[in-house]
Image (tube, rainbow, N blue to C red):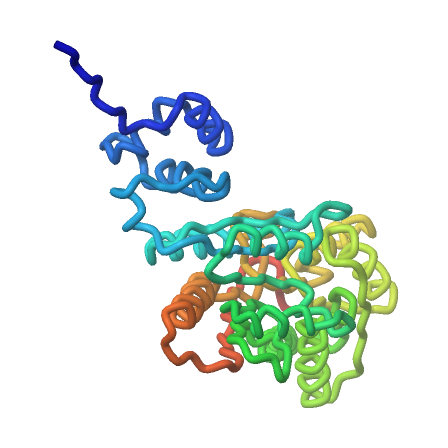
């Protein structure tokens, strides 16, 4: 009598190895996930499922029902800790809705946003979330997004509203942020308040400039603006120029630029906040533990991320979603980098 061998529920071994390599886990872990066994953390399970989808393999039927498809998440470089924080919360929220997030991180000289989009389209993603992408650059051609909408492909923007683009946009109120920072420094007696931010071709920078100028005019103060490259080095260079012009209070376009401003002040033998007060923007992780702890405008990252995911999921599911900008208010977090102006 001939006996047939029961069919294995596991994929061929070469396939296990491919998935394990992509997910950076062991083949045994891949096997447990594919067979829906216990003993695997939620994060590890999600990493395996993402690898499965990215490599183009079909999920076992028991797992297929738990996924609604791939969603692209296109971010800038991850050196600024605010972007990994956005990515982490968005990925978790997407997974809770049954979607597998595919993180696409841009680096200088690396894969471009358009190239990532083509890769995501080849994977038949259900939608894409863009964080501070080319949509935030007023000199970029925004027709690239209109073509996606016309496919139709659901997309959501975070940070960088484009007027006339038929897609939801989630933003923190940059105008209010810079106004609040100026008001805080003015309340401490500062009258020489400078603004440090990135290139003004970016719409969030333009909004920060608008809010700063309105607040300075309201307080009857003269403007002091220095635009530079985003990052610690750019912040240090801009701060050095403003301090040379007599600034005692600095409003910065990001926490990293604020750290650069503190470095520039110390390089001149000045104390923060005794001689120069510095205000950042973002309140990214570990900023409360800098020396001194940084006063900053906190972006409500969790609320913004969840709103972006809800808007995308609703659009994917065919539910009406307002194609407009959703503005979230920043929160002033006062710490040790600002103080009463020295007389």
Depth check, front residue: 187 or 54: 54
Residue that appears at 67% across and 54% down = 256
Outermost residue, left side: 1
Outermost residue, top side: 1
Residue 337 visible in the current orientation: yes
Query: On the image, which quarter does residue 146 sit in?
Result: bottom right
Depth check, front residue: 202 or 249: 202
Quadrant containing the N terminus is: top left
Depth check, front residue: 171 or 5: 5
Residue that appears at 67% across and 69% down = 144
- Vertical relation: 276 (above or below) 217: above
Q: Position of residue 71 (x, y in %)?
A: 47, 56
- Vertical relation: 23 (above or below) 325: above
Query: On the image, which quarter does residue 161 sit in?
Result: bottom right
Q: Is residue 321 left or right of residue 104?
A: left
Outermost residue, front side: 1
Q: Position of residue 35 (x, y in %)?
A: 27, 32
Residue that appears at 73% across and 83% down = 213
Quadrant containing the C terminus is: bottom right
Residue 82 visible in the current orientation: no
Residue that appears at 31% across and 34% down = 34
Q: Total of numbered circles in the picture?
A: 0
Q: Position of residue 223 (x, y in %)?
A: 79, 80
- Vertical relation: 126 (above or below) 165: above
- Vertical relation: 316 (above or below) 2: below
Q: Is residue 86 left or right of residue 206?
A: left
């Amino acid at each position: 009598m001939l006996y047939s061998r029961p069919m294995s529920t596991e994929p061929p071994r070469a396939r296990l190895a491919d998935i394990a390599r992509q997910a950076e886990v062991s083949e045994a872990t891949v096997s447990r996930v594919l067979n829906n066994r216990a003993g695997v953390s939620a994060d590890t399970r999600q990493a395996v499922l993402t690898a499965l989808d990215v490599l183009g393999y079909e999920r076992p039927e028991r797992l297929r029902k738990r996924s609604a498809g791939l969603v692209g998440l296109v971010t800038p470089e991850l050196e600024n800790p605010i972007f990994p924080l956005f990515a982490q919360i968005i990925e978790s929220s997407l997974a809770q809705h049954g979607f597998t997030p595919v993180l696409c991180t841009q680096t200088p000289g690396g894969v471009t946003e358009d190239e990532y989009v083509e890769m995501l389209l080849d994977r038949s993603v259900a939608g894409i979330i863009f964080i501070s992408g080319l949509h935030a650059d007023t000199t970029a051609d925004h027709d690239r997004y209109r073509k996606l909408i016309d496919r139709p492909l659901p997309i959501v923007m975070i940070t960088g509203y484009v007027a006339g683009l038929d897609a939801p946009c989630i933003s923190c109120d940059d105008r209010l942020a810079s106004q609040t920072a100026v008001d805080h420094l003015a309340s401490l007696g500062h009258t020489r308040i400078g603004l440090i931010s990135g290139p003004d071709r970016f719409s969030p920078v333009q909004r920060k400039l608008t809010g700063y100028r309105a607040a300075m005019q309201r307080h009857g103060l003269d403007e002091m603006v220095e635009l530079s490259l985003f990052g610690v080095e750019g912040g240090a260079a801009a701060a050095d120029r403003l301090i040379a012009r007599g600034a005692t209070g600095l409003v910065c376009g990001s926490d990293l630029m604020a750290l650069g401003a503190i470095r520039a002040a110390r390089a001149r033998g000045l104390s923060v906040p005794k001689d120069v007060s510095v205000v950042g923007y973002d309140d990214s992780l570990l900023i409360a533990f800098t020396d001194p702890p940084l006063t900053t405008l906190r972006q409500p990252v969790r609320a913004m991320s969840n709103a972006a995911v809800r808007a995308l999921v609703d659009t994917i599911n065919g539910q009406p979603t307002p194609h407009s900008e959703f503005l979230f208010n920043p929160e002033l977090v006062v710490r040790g980098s600002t103080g009463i102006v020295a007389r």
